[in-house]
């Protein structure tokens, strides 16, 4: 069978007949009818199948996964009694979800028991418990003496539970494992770590453990199903059923342009109109959930709404709340509780409410600016209408013309069910190191047995044997004195002749105190070169900086010079244009698939202009086909028309890479590469390295989802039209290795990878090292081990940069398309003023150094200059937008 989609969904009565009488009576009395995911999943789970359920919030995924299991437990309890052991394990990425799940299970268990007493059944007690890092040790000891039948946990706590000598025994007969929000886990190293733990649990159990995955809207489902179940030793995927209910709920998405003219309307007016549109939506609905793309934006929006809505009589100040990951856990839980009880009128969140935390009924979801992917758009909007028969209503309020185009395309793709493909990290060697240490603690292993187990998992299915052995040798101290003299000691023993490895003394405590894949968040202190303190920066921001980068901190402009551990050194750069906006590290990147859709849209628009369709005809088509209003359609038309006319028909798209260049105080080279920021990050660094090597000048890089800008001193001479073909599919990785080896990103990613690989230990023998000390240690080690060919911690640092932070695979694909002529490369020597599509890159850094109003004025000035040039070329006045 392998991976199959369930086509024949049983009817309601057929499913009810499969359940014990009190369970069926309880369900019918409380819910009436099963949802489509429930009708599909319950029979398969009761038959002992592996199941992946993909459906939006409010479609009953929890009961789809659990009702069949509860029914089976009741049956076993009635027939032979339930033993003191764990029968089912539930794993979720959030501790908040775990507490929700416990509540969501205890309530039905009590209600079913009451229904059973009415019908003469004496149902057994089913115990449920949460085991996470928050669980007190006294509770864990109770679980060891009397384990829950259903264990609720996180990936990290499951890994530790597998090594807890006494509790491990209670896991030997687990029948089911349920992985919630599997799409969220799969896209990070946490998922890779979890799936090896699940495989080890599968090996431990005496049963053929069944796997149940619950996912929001994602694609491709076949890949996610293989991630859930893994592979047999013959390399074939294990059997699994997919229940595709991703579009079971009706959706209603609209894009809103707050003003008629997104270019020439002053910034304060645009801002005012955005909040007017938002207030109007809140007024018309009982509960509104607003998503921003950054935590700082969430705080700004809440501050504004708390002043605006009470004045208009729409909401009291205590009915308006913020929810994001930087808030304390108590504050977040309080907001969630108030939402569930219907006490809030509006909640503003960054990404923290995307996952399936139970927040009660939401009438409408508003997105302020683009969500950057179709799957995220559907996931956010899916929070509205918390029932399968309720419409998920979403409204997207745009802020500028690029945002308008992007949101229009994403909304259309969502309605057309075109979903971005999930990207799963493959062969992360730091996760592999942790798991090899964990395996050594539980048993003595033959290396081939260990290798076979790892290859049964999706993340390590194609793991090369030499990579596997390099990690085993590294953990066993196989890289000799040059590493050990820096206090990097072996964590396992390895007999190469016999091909066996096992536990070294002390490794259990190292694993307990240092395992996990989530890097510590830290702040970097910023000083001027004469040691004066300036302020703090988030480490995620510092890691994207290169010497010479210009940024704003505390309202002043600085040039980045260097770092020393968790200290950064800068010098004043008054009057210079910032190259890296302060929100850059927080901002979500546009998905590659969605970027290609935006490129296709641009191409369709350009072809309509090229064949001389009238403005009125194109606007009618936009309104009808993309379901946008007159203002939005008019703005899109004018934007593309101006680009077309200004460049002589050169509208960058999925089939056209436009390289634009001009001189002002710099030589500016813009690649209009609409492939998303992660892909452009890889391309830009490779091209910048080539230019820097050939000219000897430092190259400043500005990156966005729609392209990248390379800036050199105006004195530089360079043949721009020779540049695009100097980076190829074959040489991009070697160029990036040379470009990245001495960067902040490499130094900081190496520290995270070294911590995950147990090369440097944050906690050991009762001591905890500060991030500053860890970073200094990591930088010393990097200088040593970067000279060792194939050293696994260095190789994983490169892999994480190229695959998780950048998108080297997509960058290589773009270069392949250029090489084969599928993407044409054309050039535009701009007459002093950049083309309309380049304006967002030119002004990007200014958002920090000048007021929003002045940034807007700069955009307006550029636009006026473009219009003046068009009037000169066309010999007539150009109509205002």
Image: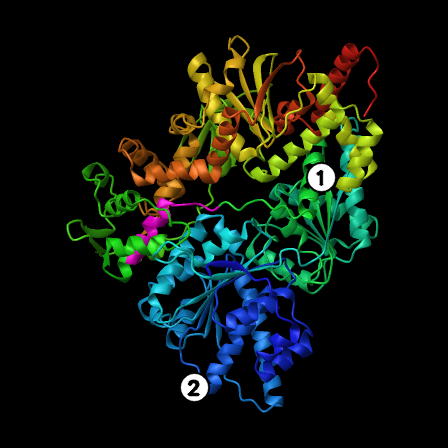
Q: Is residue 874 visible?
A: yes
Task: Give the image quarter of residue 778.
Answer: top left
Q: Is residue 757 left or right of residue 691?
A: left
Q: Is residue 245 above or below residue 572?
A: below
Q: Is residue 292 magenta?
A: no
Query: What colour scheme governs how the chains and residues are painted in the rendered image of this protein?
Result: rainbow
Residue 674 % position (x, y): 60, 30
* Marks 1 & 2, CB-CB < 8 Å contact: no
Magenta span: 424-439
Question: Which residue bears the numbered disc 1?
Answer: 408
Q: Is residue 434 magenta?
A: yes
- Total label count? 2
**Secondary element type, mark 1:** helix
Q: Is residue 327 left or right of residue 238?
A: right
Residue 272 % position (x, y): 79, 38
Q: Main secondary structure of the magenta part?
A: helix
Q: Nearer the viewer, residue 480 or 621?
A: 621
Question: Which residue bears the numbered disc 2?
Answer: 80
Task: Give the image quarter of residue 563.
Answer: top left
Residue 803 % position (x, y): 45, 38
Q: Is residue 108 above or below residue 95?
A: below
Q: Nearer the viewer, residue 870 or 145?
A: 870
Q: Is residue 581 above or below residue 219?
A: above
**What is the residue that sits farthest to the left in this orientation?**
497
Q: Earlier in the sequence, mark 1 or mark 2?
A: 2
Q: Who's the residue at 34% across and 42% down the image? A: 754
């Amino acid at each position: 069978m392998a991976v199959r989609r369930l086509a024949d969904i049983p009817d309601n009565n057929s499913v009810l007949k499969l359940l014990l009488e009190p369970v069926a009576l309880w369900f019918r009395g409380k819910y009436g009818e099963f949802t489509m995911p429930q009708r599909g999943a319950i029979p398969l789970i009761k038959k002992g199948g592996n199941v992946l359920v993909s459906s939006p919030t409010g479609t009953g995924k929890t009961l789809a996964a659990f009702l069949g299991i509860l029914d089976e437990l009741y049956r076993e309890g009635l027939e032979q009694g339930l033993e003191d052991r764990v029968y089912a394990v539930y794993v979720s990425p959030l501790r908040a979800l775990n507490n929700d799940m416990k509540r969501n299970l205890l309530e039905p268990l009590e209600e079913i028991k009451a229904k059973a007493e009415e019908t003469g059944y004496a149902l057994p007690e089913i115990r449920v418990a949460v085991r996470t890092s928050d669980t007190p040790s006294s509770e864990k000891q109770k679980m060891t003496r009397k384990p829950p039948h259903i264990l609720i946990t996180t990936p990290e706590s499951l890994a530790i539970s597998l090594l807890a000598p006494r509790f491990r025994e209670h896991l030997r007969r687990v029948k089911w494992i349920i992985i919630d929000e599997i799409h969220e886990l799969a896209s990070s190293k946490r998922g890779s770590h979890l799936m090896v733990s699940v495989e080890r649990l599968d090996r431990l159990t005496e049963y053929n453990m069944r796997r149940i995955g619950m996912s929001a809207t994602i694609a491709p489902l076949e890949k996610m199903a293989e991630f859930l179940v893994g592979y047999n030793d013959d390399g074939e995927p294990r059997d699994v059923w997919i229940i595709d209910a991703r579009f079971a709920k009706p959706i209603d998405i609209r894009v809103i342009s707050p003003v008629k003219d997104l270019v020439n309307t002053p910034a304060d007016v645009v801002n005012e109109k955005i909040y007017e549109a938002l207030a109007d939506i809140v007024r018309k609905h009982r509960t509104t959930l607003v998503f921003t793309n950054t935590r700082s934006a969430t705080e700004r929006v809440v501050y504004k709404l708390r002043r605006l809505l009470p004045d208009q009589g729409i909401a009291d100040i205590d009915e308006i709340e913020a929810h994001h990951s930087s808030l304390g856990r108590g504050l977040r839980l309080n907001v969630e509780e108030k939402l569930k009880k219907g006490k809030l009128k509006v909640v503003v969140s960054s990404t923290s409410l995307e996952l399936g935390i139970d927040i009660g009924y939401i009438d409408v979801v508003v997105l302020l600016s683009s969500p950057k992917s179709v799957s995220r758009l559907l996931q956010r909007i899916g929070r509205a209408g918390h029932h399968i028969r309720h419409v998920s209503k979403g409204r997207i309020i745009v802020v500028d013309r690029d945002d308008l185009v992007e949101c229009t395309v994403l909304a259309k793709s969502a309605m057309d069910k075109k979903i971005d493909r999930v990207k799963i990290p493959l062969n992360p060697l730091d996760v592999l190191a942790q798991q090899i240490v964990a395996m050594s603690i539980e048993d003595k292993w033959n290396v081939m047995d260990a290798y076979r187990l790892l290859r049964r998992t999706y993340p390590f299915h194609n793991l090369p044997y030499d990579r596997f052995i390099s990690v085993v040798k590294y953990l066993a101290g196989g890289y000799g004195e040059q590493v050990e003299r820096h206090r990097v000691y072996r964590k396992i023993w390895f007999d190469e002749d016999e091909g066996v490895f096992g536990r070294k003394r002390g490794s259990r405590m190292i694993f307990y105190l240092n395992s996990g894949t989530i890097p510590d968040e830290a702040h970097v202190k910023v000083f001027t070169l004469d040691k004066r303190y300036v302020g703090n920066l988030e480490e995620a921001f510092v890691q994207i900086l290169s010497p010479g980068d210009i940024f704003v901190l505390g309202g002043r402009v600085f040039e980045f010079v260097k770092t020393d551990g968790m200290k950064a050194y800068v010098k004043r750069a008054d009057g210079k244009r910032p190259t890296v906006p302060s929100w850059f590290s927080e901002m979500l990147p546009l998905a590659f698939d969605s970027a290609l859709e935006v490129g296709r849209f641009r191409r369709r628009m350009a072809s309509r202009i090229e064949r001389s369709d009238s403005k009125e005809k194109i606007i009618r088509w936009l309104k009808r086909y993309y379901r946008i209003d007159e203002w939005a359609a008019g703005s899109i038309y004018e934007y593309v028309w101006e680009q077309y006319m200004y460049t002589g028909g050169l509208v960058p798209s999925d089939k056209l890479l436009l390289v634009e260049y001009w001189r002002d105080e710099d030589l500016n080279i813009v690649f209009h590469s609409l492939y998303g920021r992660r892909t452009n990050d890889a391309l830009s660094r490779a091209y910048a390295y080539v230019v820097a090597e050939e000219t000897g000048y430092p190259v400043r890089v500005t990156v966005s989802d729609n392209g990248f800008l390379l800036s050199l001193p105006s004195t530089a001479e360079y043949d721009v039209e020779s540049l695009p073909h100097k980076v190829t599919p074959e040489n991009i990785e070697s160029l990036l290795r040379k470009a990245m080896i001495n960067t902040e990103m490499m130094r900081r990613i190496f520290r995270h990878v070294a911590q995950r690989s147990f090369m440097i230990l944050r906690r050991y023998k009762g001591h905890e090292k500060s991030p500053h000390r860890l970073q200094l240690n990591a930088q010393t080690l990097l200088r040593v081990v970067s000279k060792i060919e194939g050293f696994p911690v260095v190789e994983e640092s490169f892999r994480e940069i190229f695959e998780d932070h950048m998108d080297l695979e997509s960058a290589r694909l773009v270069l392949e398309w250029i090489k084969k002529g599928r993407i044409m490369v054309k050039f535009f020597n701009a007459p002093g003023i950049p083309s309309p599509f380049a304006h967002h890159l030119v002004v990007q850094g200014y958002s920090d150094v000048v007021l929003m109003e002045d940034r807007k004025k700069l955009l307006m000035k550029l636009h006026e200059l473009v219009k003046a040039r068009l009037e000169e070329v066309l010999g007539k006045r150009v109509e205002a937008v």
